[in-house]
Image (tube, helix red, strand yellow):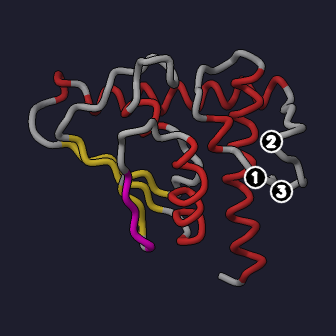
Amino acid sequence: MSGASDRAVISTGDDAALAKLSAVRAGYLDDDFASPMSAGAVGLRGGSSRGVAAEPVIRRGTHARVAAVDRCVGAFLSPRSGGGRRQVVVLGAGRDTSYLRRRFAGGGRGAALPPLPPDTGWYEVDHPSVVREKARRWLPRCVPGGHRYQFDEEGGSY
């Protein structure tokens, strides 16, 4: 991809983060990680996290998408779905907070989701510049003290 094409694709992730932040601020979602994860986001139309205010239909759509993904991942991770190690691979992860909301469930952080089973592998893959920004800029604002995360330039594992 060219630089302009890369930025346009990456900006769609910024738009999703800004829509999610708007939904959180309006009370549609509970996600303590939405604000720090959207820091510096500039959507396709030049919006930013400071002045974000999505239309109600966007907030409802964001809520529906987050709820559907949470339900599907929860069913996959459920002990009833069979034993053994599970791996979740998130393609185009961008500023997604699913891992954070599950890994740090409870303690007043994020939505009330069941915690990750201890033998779960969670991998996030995106454009190298997005993975780099997530690891260097956004995750330090989200990961509670005493916890580590790691990443590599080709993909992310936290």
Q: Is residue 128 left or right of residue 116?
A: right
- Give the CA distance from mark 1 to mark 2: 7 Å
Q: Is residue 153 left or right of residue 79?
A: right
Q: Residue beneath label 3, please? A: 44
Mark 1 or 3, closer to the camera: 1
- Residue type (three-letter) at the residue carrying disc 1: Gly
- Residue type (three-letter) at the residue carrying disc 2: Ser
Residue 152, image x, y percentages: 39, 69
Q: Are marks 1 and 2 in contact (CB under 8 Å)?
A: yes
Q: Residue beneath label 1, please? A: 40
- Image point (38%, 52%), residue name: 149
- Give the CA distance from mark 2 to mark 3: 13 Å
Neighbor class of circle 2 (other Cα within 10 Å; few <14, some 14-19, many 20+) is many
Neighbor class of circle 1 (other Cα within 10 Å; few <14, some 14-19, many 20+) is some
Span colored in magenta: 149-153
The disc, 2 or 3, on the residue closer to the chain's N-terminal end is 3
- Residue type (three-letter) at the residue carrying disc 3: Leu
Neighbor class of circle 3 (other Cα within 10 Å; few <14, some 14-19, many 20+) is some
Residue 39, image x, y percentages: 71, 47
SS assignment at label 2: loop
- Give the CA distance from mark 1 to mark 3: 13 Å
Residue furthest toward the left? 83
The disc, 1 or 2, on the residue closer to the chain's N-terminal end is 1
SS assignment at label 1: loop
